[in-house]
């Protein structure tokens, strides 16, 4: 074991020495040029930033020089370290001096300057892919795949525009998410995720192990340094997931937190793509601008991919997936294909309406109504505020009033003050109506009944605990 570790250490030293000597004819010249290529001097920290480390580690200058010297590049290092440090610390000929580093896909260069004239290191590393024109056979295969996943021609081109924008325009992300859902398994949802990840770069992408758990969690600092967020296998849990994801889809700035660390404010560069095998993965209302939704199903959604009704479609997906994963040309051909998508008329700010999205909106309303009518418990309350009943749920006011009326509640006329709270949305519960309350009563009349109710040992007001 010890021998293996020593051999591994020796190999590392040899590789580092070889890398350094590529930068100059003499060891000293090579070390200086190698250091300039690898480190930057961070002015506020007074330390060196290692651009070769994944987390951009900060080091003391002498520690960085000792790291280079440890590979045995100098026969006699006495005095050498100090002289090299002096050269590299000279502003005119030493390391590039920066204020810090930030992930900036919207900046074209490796260095960018802020409004105060301070220089920053751009840590964004694009996925560099060439482009190759598809053969007629490849083009037919690509078209067949997209025609199956998105049968509607207009919606299909919109999905392709979303993908092309995400891949080709790092300076401007899509400000709405793309959701592919359907009960059928193996329909290409994961294949599109793979296509996007390969085009954008694995290091620029995040796919949480449990997407719903991640979406509802407090700690989301792992989106820092990412351009693509994939939420896989979302399952319906009411309003929570779509509500929690709002800032990641639309907000230009994000406050994210890691365990044991303070909040960090970062620019939002995320394109959000989600998938689900649930028929109702998200709660959406009819004013939603954040989600473009496409339903993907086999011809016979009640059967698996090997059923005779579905086998031809299954072959289309399998063939495309195999080509994507095994062909040396696939990434370059897809890049060329995406470069042909016209983005001049593409609106990155508003999700197009689709039939699948209308279905989700209608399903969300039906579930919200069912949850309210069967789960809402007003306890002993005679009156409640409508805003409290529907708190956290984006249900249109007209629907709120309709559901309350159908469930036996009556809205109080106008603005009244009850227990020091003046509002226009007081509603009388069925129990309040039994106690003699009516919508035309003023605040004083209602309060007299509330006080009598309270004397009976009951709470006249109620903050609902049974959420929809």
Image: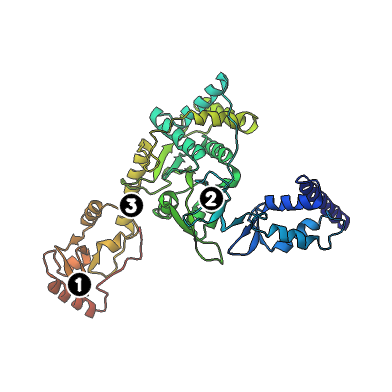
Would you name the residue on which mark 3 appears? 368
Instruction: Provide residue 426's location: percent of width, then percent of height.
Output: 21, 65
Is residue 310 placed above or below 70 in the rendered structure? Answer: above
- Please tell me which residue lies in front, 168 or 250: 168
Q: Is residue 374 visible?
A: yes
Residue positioned 38% across, 38% down in the render: 347
Of tags 3 and 2, the one toward the viewer is 2
Earlier in the chain: of badge 2 and badge 1, it is 2
Earlier in the chain: of badge 1 and badge 3, it is 3
Q: CA distance from mark 3 to mark 2?
A: 48 Å
Instruction: Provide residue 13's location: percent of width, then percent of height.
Output: 81, 52
Q: Is residue 241 visible?
A: no
Question: Which SS class for mark 2?
Answer: strand
Q: Quarter of the image containing the C terminus?
A: bottom left
Residue 112: mark: 2
Q: Quarter of the image containing the N terminus?
A: bottom right
The image quarter containing residue 129 is top right
């Amino acid at each position: 074991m010890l021998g293996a570790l020593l051999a591994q250490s020796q190999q590392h030293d040899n590789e580092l020495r070889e890398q350094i000597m590529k930068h100059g004819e003499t060891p000293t010249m090579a070390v200086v040029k190698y250091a300039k290529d690898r480190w930057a001097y961070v002015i506020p920290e007074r330390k060196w930033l290692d651009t070769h480390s994944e987390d951009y580690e900060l080091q003391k200058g002498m520690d960085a020089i000792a790291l280079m010297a440890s590979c045995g590049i100098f026969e006699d290092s006495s005095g050498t370290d100090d002289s090299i440090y002096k050269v590299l610390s000279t502003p005119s000929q030493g390391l590039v001096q920066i204020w810090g580093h930030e992930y900036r896909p919207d900046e074209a260069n490796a260095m960018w300057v802020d409004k105060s004239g301070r220089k920053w290191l751009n840590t964004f590393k694009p996925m560099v892919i060439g482009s190759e024109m598809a053969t007629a056979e490849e083009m037919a295969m690509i078209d067949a795949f997209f025609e199956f996943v998105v049968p509607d021609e207009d919606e299909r081109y919109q999905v392709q525009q979303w993908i092309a924008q995400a891949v080709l325009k790092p300076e401007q992300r899509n400000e709405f998410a793309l959701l592919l859902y359907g009960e059928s398994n193996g329909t290409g949802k994961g294949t599109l995720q793979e296509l996007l990840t390969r085009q954008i770069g694995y290091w620029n992408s995040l796919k949480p192990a449990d997407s719903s758990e991640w979406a509802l969690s407090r700690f989301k600092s792992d989106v820092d340094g990412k351009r693509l967020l994939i939420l896989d296998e979302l399952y319906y849990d009411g309003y929570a997931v779509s509500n929690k994801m709002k800032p990641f889809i639309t907000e230009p700035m994000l406050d994210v937190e890691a365990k044991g660390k303070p909040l960090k404010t970062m620019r939002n560069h995320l394109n959000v793509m989600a998938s689900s095998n649930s028929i109702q993965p998200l709660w959406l209302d009819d004013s939603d601008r954040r989600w473009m939704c496409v339903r993907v199903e086999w011809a016979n959604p009640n059967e698996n991919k090997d059923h005779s009704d579905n086998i031809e479609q299954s072959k289309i997906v399998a063939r495309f997936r195999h080509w994507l994963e095994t062909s040396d040309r696939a990434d370059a051909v897809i890049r060329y294909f995406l470069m042909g998508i016209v983005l001049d008329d593409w609106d990155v700010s508003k999700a197009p309406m689709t039939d699948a999205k209308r279905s989700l909106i209608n399903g969300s309303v039906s579930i919200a109504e069912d949850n309210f009518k069967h789960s809402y418990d007003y306890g002993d309350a005679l009156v409640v505020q409508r805003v409290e009943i529907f708190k956290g749920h984006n249900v249109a006011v007209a629907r709120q009033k309709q559901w309350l009326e159908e469930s036996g509640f009556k809205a109080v006329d106008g603005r009244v003050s009850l227990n020091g709270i003046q509002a226009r949305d007081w509603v009388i519960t069925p129990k309040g109506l039994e106690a003699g309350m009516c919508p035309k009563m003023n605040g004083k009349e209602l309060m007299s009944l509330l006080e009598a109710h309270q004397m009976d040992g009951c709470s006249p007001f109620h903050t609902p605990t049974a959420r929809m």
